[in-house]
Image (spheres, rainbow, N blue to C red):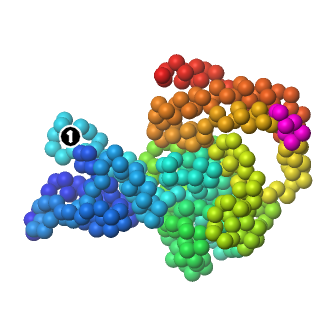
Amino acid sequence: MNKLTPMMEQYLEVKKQNPGCLLFFRLGDFYEMFFDDALTASKELEITLTGRSCGQEERAPMCGVPYHAAETYIQRLIQKGYKVAICEQMEDPKLAKGIVKREITRIVTPGTNMNAESLEENKNNYICSVNRVEDVMGLAVADVTTGEFLVTELTEEEKFWDELAKYRPTELLVSEDLKNMESLDFDRIAKTYSVFVNPYPNYHYQYQRCKDRILQHFKVLSLEGLGLQEMPLGATAAGALLDYLLETQKRDLGHISKLTTYSLQQYMMLDATTRRNLELTQTLRDKGRKGSLLWGLDYTSTAMGGRLLRSWIEQPLVDRAKILRRLDAVEEFAGQHVLTMTLSEELQGVYDVERLLSKVSYKSLNARDCLSLCASLKKVPGIRSLLENAKSEGVKAVYALLDPLADLTALLDRAIH
């Protein structure tokens, strides 16, 4: 048998280290795919299948996409439920001695998709992680585009289905043991919620490993401060999810700076059937947003406000004090039409700061994003002045937390034309 070319050996080695992914292998101005990946991609993307000499008697099946248009093709594959590993050239080919050094820089999956153009701005893109021992289940939920990270424990399988109906994740991470058990119908889960069910090696769910990962990431000394001391299965679901995000994103996840534990008793329990029949966020007829309760209520001025309103509708409060605090804040604006309209106009100039901050962590912030962040920060003093005479506790709390970050605003303003 003829020996493979050095470049093809490099390709196969990278491919071996990333099983289950379609490998986008950078060659000059193109990302190329070979062998089975080429056969799959050419069919799914409807692009030409060719061949390349690889040192063997038969040419290797090959297809490719231009570097500058790759994101479009990646999104099409993600929407079809594939994982895509991006292998970049880590040195200038003109200066390289021998084969060009290449490394995986990120792995794109449905739940870790950062492409703003392919995501709904008023809807979170959640990835969930689940673990189970007997009748107790740990559930961790994250949105890498906003930094949100939530953890809970469930004691009934029906409640797990209800939580899936609430979050509607695009990807569900499960331990291999759990995936192989018949206790949960993952085929039904995938079909019902159009979610990519992703088995993950069991060792990622080991308690000590997960505990160490959580303490390291959130820079705390114990799980008690995070509310996880009495949630061992919640901790394993959270630790495994952090492992997976670090493994696929290949970078610091500093924008995920807060872990929030919650109990199902904090919110009104709505099962999947009730949510569907009430048409909270989508209609029964065509699964569209128009005609739903959210559609009728959503007059928010920002993408962040739209996502917050959706979460409030999905999770109605049951605590009387919290309900009254929220209603007092609503009443304050309902009674002052001019204030409300003025504030709404100010907020329309605020961009999606949550997702802009995630771009900072990903080092993908461009000049236009910096200007958007700067323009948003410039709106803060005006918004604060409008809230200065607030009477309700909820609005007072918002006023106290608003920081104009004058130094950062000035830096962005003078640094970018």
Instruction: Using the image as rendered, state which of residue 178 and residue 186 is in the foreground.
Output: 186
Which residue type does callout 1 highlight? Pro
Measuring 51% from the left and 77% from the top, which residue is drawn there?
180
Where is residue 97 shown, x and y percent of the image? Answer: 16, 40
Q: Quadrant of residue 396?
A: top right
Q: Give the labeled residue for mark 1.
A: 93
User: Horizontal placement of 290 versus 36: left or right?
Assistant: right
The span shown in magenta is 333-339
* 184 over 166 or under it: above or below: below
Where is residue 100 shown, x and y percent of the image? Answer: 22, 44
Measuring 13% from the left and 68% from the top, which residue is drawn there?
58
* 346 over 252 or under it: above or below: above
Instruction: Using the image as rendered, state which of residue 6 and residue 303 is in the foreground.
Output: 303
Mark 1 neighbour density, 10 Å: few (under 14) some (14–19) many (20 or more): some
Measuring 24% from the left and 37% from the top, which residue is drawn there?
92
Quadrant the N terminus occupies:
bottom left
Where is residue 145 shown, x and y percent of the image? Answer: 56, 47
Q: Residue 108: in sight, yes or no?
A: yes
Measuring 63% from the left and 69% from the top, which residue is drawn there?
286
Where is residue 5 shown, x and y percent of the image? Answer: 14, 57
Numbered circles on residues, count: 1
Kindly state the secondary structure of the residue where label 1 is placed: loop
Instruction: Using the image as rendered, state which of residue 78 and residue 300 is in the foreground.
Output: 300
The secondary structure that most of the magenta stretch takes on is: helix
Q: Is residue 43 magenta?
A: no
* 237 over 155 or under it: above or below: above
User: Horizontal placement of 29 versus 254: left or right?
Assistant: left
Q: Residue 207: in sight, yes or no?
A: no
User: Horizontal placement of 92 versus 352: left or right?
Assistant: left
